[in-house]
Amino acid sequence: MNFLAIGAISGCLVVILGAFGAHGLKDVFNEYGKSVYEKAVFYHMFHTMAILLVGLIEKIQPGIQLSVAGWVFISGIILFSGSLYILSVTGIKLLGMITPIGGVLFIIGWVILFLKVR
């Protein structure tokens, strides 16, 4: 899998979502919704960098197989940031139960990365 390409797409998407939240949704958010949306953008961008890191390591050291870590980071973005994006706009509190699963996936991704590169 080309994690550099996926990371580039994710980076573009997070900038679009960040700008949309700041400008297009500014009248929709209350303070809580705004802080939740900002957290979603922050973790989305941070783990987009992790996906790019996975892609770079695989390019530089082709013997190190990091696709599981890459897919776990992608899944974490979808569940963690995705649930927060939706929660911030809809106010559906049940979505908050999905968010920690994404957070655990982020942790697992970092552990896999550590174990593969040590």
Image (spheres, rainbow, N blue to C red):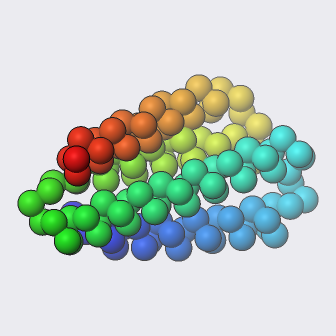
Q: Using residue 39 as the reference point, say whether residue 79 is left or right of it.
A: left
| Position of residue 20 measured from the top left corner of the image (x, y, whole percent) | 72, 67
Quarter where residue 106 is shown = top left
Q: Is residue 68 visible?
A: no
| Position of residue 24 measured from the top left corner of the image (x, y, whole percent) | 80, 67
Please tell me which residue is depicted at 48% across the width and 37% down the height of the picture. 102
Q: Using residue 67 as the reference point, say whether residue 81 is left or right of it.
A: right
Quarter where residue 105 is shown = top left
| Position of residue 33 measured from the top left corner of the image (x, y, whole percent) | 80, 45
Please tell me which residue is depicted at 72% across the width and 33% down the height of the picture. 92
From this viewpoint, which residue is outermost toward the left? Answer: 63
Eyeballing the image, is 29 above or below 103?
below
Please tell me which residue is depicted at 29% across the width and 44% down the height of the picture. 114
Which quarter of the figure is the N terminus placed in?
bottom left
- Which sits in the foreground, 32 or 108? 108
Q: Is residue 27 visible?
A: yes
- Which sits in the foreground, 52 or 36? 52
Please tell me which residue is depicted at 31% across the width and 53% down the height of the picture. 70
Eyeballing the image, is 88 above or below 15?
above
Q: Using residue 67 as the reference point, say whether residue 23 is left or right of it.
A: right
Q: What number of labels is visible?
A: 0
Eyeballing the image, is 70 above or below 100?
below
From this viewpoint, which residue is outermost toward the front? Answer: 118
